[in-house]
Amino acid sequence: MAVSQPYNIPRLLIAGAASNVGKTTVTAGLIAALREQGVVVQPFKCGPDYIDPTWHSRAAGRACRNLDTWMLDDAMLVESFVRACRGADVAVIEGMMGLFDGADWDDERGSTAQISKLLGTPIVLVADICAAANSAAVPVLGCRQFDPEAPLAAVVLNRAGSEGHAGGCARAITGRSALPVLGWLPAEDRLRVPQRHLGLMPGGEHPETEALIGRIAAQVSARFDLQALLGIARAAQPVMAGKALWSLPPVGGQERLPTQTDRGRERKLSAVRPPVLAVARDEAFCFYYPENLELLQAYGAVIEFFSPIRGECPPEGADGVYLGGGYPELHAAALADNTALWQSLRALRARDAPLYAECGGFMALTEDLLDLEGRRWPMAGLVPGTVRMSDQLAALGYRYATAPAANLLVDAGGTLRGHEFRYSSWEADLREAELAAAWKARSLGGPEGPIGYAQGNLLASYLHVHFGQSPAIASRFVGQLARTRAARQS
């Protein structure tokens, strides 16, 4: 059993009473403003979001990490947080949705408030005052009274009409809630992060990413009391955590530390060199939990990246492929033209090499993709059926996924937690045997149904899975990679 010890990590959590109040704008601007002062900031995002973290990563110059207490248990989340903060002066966390919105209606699990209490992190509430005067105090006071244990420490204002407007709302908020107001941003379109169908446009794809972050940071530096905010962050009590044992690789899928016999067995599986996992990474395949890749590396995989939309294929000698989520629909022409990629994936599939695909990666493995203009683009053809894009949200939420038969990640009957967010639908006429093996999922309290395709070492679905929820996931994946390499060498 891991022994907990204290870690002194200054930290703030940026939250809102609801979605769309400007949390991402404030968080990215605060991170960049602190970085300009020489402060090393480790960014985080509550929940399963992949897009907001791209802005925070750009602002901080460090990879933003997700904090998701629905997919990870408390101990793993705290250890993951502490591990990511090594070398940082302060952690800045962006909340998800509204402060108290969690995985379901009945408890706080997965909510920003729960994460703030678990990590003992002071909350800075963003209040959108665009259409308010004295009433700006209502959501702030409501958050304070809804759960007095939530560590609300301060408020910042967004979309103020003028300095006078900001000052008046600040007096109303402090007078009613006793919370200090430590800054404000004006209501200017040039400070807004642009959106598209999956939410915000990812940082790096917007043509003026750096300029936009710079504009927001300049406003934060001019109008926020950064020293007061840092004082709140430094007043946070130490975090109690173990020594990140989840990152040490148990062998053979068992949640235990490896023995000398185990290590010898794994060395025999890969006597010449470690197994190589090719990971697609570009604008079409850009949604990955950093911990997933780190855990695969911790268990012995060598990761090599390639860009499908730039005509690249998995490197020669790859023992498997990981296709993450992203935007294949926006790059369908480039993907369809990369016929060498499809041939490479089919060759890997022919020898049952591990092929793992999530959401956008799943879409790329189907027979074809039908875009919003009705154009049909040929894909890999390793998963039966067509993916059809829609301008309406098709699915969103947490899922329990079950394996009717053993697959790449779990044994038969095994269950994992994941998240689904898509604007497309999978249309496939599966045979009886395919349905029997299909990766199935259900929402919280909902019916179970196919969410993807599983056959041998091919596992492709709409589901995003955080490997940190169980050491057995990465261990099993890398074990299959090692067996593929050993079979090629025999």
Image: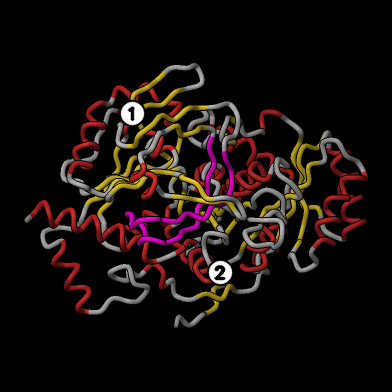
Q: Nearer the viewer, residue 290 or 122?
A: 290
Q: Which mark is residue 74?
A: 2
Q: Which quadrant, please, contains the N terminus? A: bottom left
Instruction: State whether residue 37 appears in this view.
Output: no
In this picture, residue 321 sits left or right of residue 37: left
Percent coordinates x, y for residue 59 in the rendering: 54, 44
What residue sits right under mark 1 in the picture? 379
Label 1 amino acid?
Met
Q: Which residues are magenta?
A: 395-422
Percent coordinates x, y for residue 42 in the rendering: 53, 56
In this picture, residue 437 sits left or right of residue 105: left
- Residue 413 colored magenta? yes
Instruction: State whether residue 191 appears in this view.
Output: yes
Q: Quadrant of residue 341?
A: top left
| Label 2 environment density (alpha carbons within 10 Å; few <14, some 14–19, many ≥20) | some
In this picture, residue 226 sits left or right of residue 480: right
